[in-house]
Image (cartoon, rainbow, N blue to C red):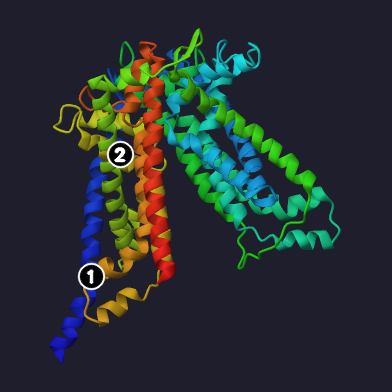
Amino acid sequence: MTSAVGGRLGAVSRPESNAKRIVALCLVLFGIFLAVPMLIILYTSLTGPEGVGLGNFVRAFRDLGLGTILKNSFATSLGSALITTTLAFIIAYTVEYTDAPGLFKRAIRIVAMLPMLLPTITYGFAIIYAFGKQGLITRLLGGRQLFNIYGVNGIVLGYIVYTLPVSFVLIENTMRYIDKKFLIISRVLSDRAPRSFFTTVFRPLLGTLAASIIQCFFLCFTDYGIPMAVGGRFEVIATALYGQMLGALPDFNGGSAIAVMMLIPSCLSILLLAYMERFNISYKQVSRVELTPNKVRDIVWSVLSILISLLVIGIFATIIVVPLVSGWPYDLSLTTKNFASVFGDSGLVRVYKNSIVVALMTALFGTILVYGVGLATVRSKLDTAAAKITRNIALISNTIPGMVLGIAYMLTFSGTPLQNTFVLIVICTVIHYYATPYLMMKSSLEKMDPSWETTARLMGDSWFDTVRRVITPNAIPTLLEIFRYYFVNAMVTVSAVIFIVGADTALLTTKIKELEHYQQFDDIFVLSLLILVSNLILRAITRGMMTRRAKKASAA
């Protein structure tokens, strides 16, 4: 009897011991590739010819005009975030609160999500070819240029397109779960339209709208690709940081100081996001309510959504049209020579293969890491300080901009065997985008029946058997979403990897930055289309796998 009890106790302890091993590996990984690089960049920012101190920060404000640069970054980022949230709200409201045709709703939803499939550096060049003096949209308007594309205008427009998908997803997801029965109650109470709108739609969305503004601000403030392409002489903190680290006269100490300064608004953004969650309203049950027919409402919101969609479509049309003509804007005859030139260049083909390999390896390794950490921290009774730290790593990694992480890697791993390797690029990308996949995995695992492991243990199954036979099949949809998330972001990232790639490990996004110096915009747009098509194919494959699995589940 004693041995039987001991065997059961041993069986009970094994999941915790397995979880401890996973947590230990995670802590080692993040210790080497997150904590150490960030400590090194902090140390570098505090050291200089005069020793340890704040000299680098003082020089940045005095010699580089960092105060003005920060004001530029704050103004453009906040303005863009406010505009983007407004536009995303319009599209989300059209989808969730109007009786517009279903096909139309699906179309504007797809258009709103398109920008996330391309690197931000491409938007800048597309804006030039769309709204410049000889741009596609300018020519369609009879040669009248709407605005000067360089400086604040171009940066803000690029930021809006860049952050529209993020804002739309946040707002539309919350709108979907707002109980629409309160619309009926408001009508019964004879509320006027503005009051009804505020109490039944805007008030429940207040926390999400604030979160959208904060998240969009964070993304704009830390983006490098858009201001590099259309910023002109208007400098923001991301371009200042790039110039310090990879300019004609690199200053690693000064650049590290700017990187640390960039961390402060990033950390504040994440803390504000956590704080704003308390303003979200949740409903125990969401009622299915038919919307009151209102053609004026449907037409007005649909027209507004069409105008927003046309802005995105105009930019994407430029990316498609320009490489299909012989020489924009003077020779508009159709041709495939630009595509043939890219595919006939062995160097560019190799770069494309590099990107695909890195994206697949990032998606695979990232999914395994996130799943393992999720199992260890959610599907076990492990409750140690190490497990709590592991759970908080997602919050920490989410506060670090890609540029700062890339610079930290450059300072840490230069001269080591990892320098200019795909391994380092993959690890950097996995850690850079770790937060969202982990939260997705954590949410999915928490919704599963907590008694599965106990039941399996009583039946004599090991923890790994339970994971393999029970948990993993139920987690496959989330695992596919995480795989897709990592793949797409690995294909479009530029700020995190531009500091750590080499001649043999160049990626499509870093190659686009190189081609910009030679004004080879036809090649840039072809490479951008390769990124877009690759992401669309991957999304189609994963969506097909999810659909087939859902059909099998419903048939069973």
**Residue 322 placement (x, y as % from top left):** 47, 18
Relative placement, left or right, of 333 versus 109 is left
68 versus 297 height, above or below = above
Q: Can residue 493 be seen in this view?
A: no
Residue on which disc 2 sits: 359
- Earlier-in-chain disc, 1 versus 2: 2
Q: Nearer the viewer, residue 359 or 440?
A: 359
Give the quarter of the figure containing the N terminus: bottom left
Could you say which quadrant of the image residue 405 lies in?
top left
Residue at the far bottom: name it: 1
Residue drawn at (31%, 70%), measured in percent from left and top? 470
Query: How many neighbours does mark 1 have within 10 angstroms: few (below 14), some (14-19), or many (20 or more)?
Result: some
Mark 2 residue element: helix
Query: How many neighbours does mark 2 have within 10 angstroms: few (below 14), some (14-19), or many (20 or more)?
Result: many
Residue on which disc 1 sits: 465
Relative placement, left or right, of 23 versus 260 is left
106 versus 156 height, above or below = below
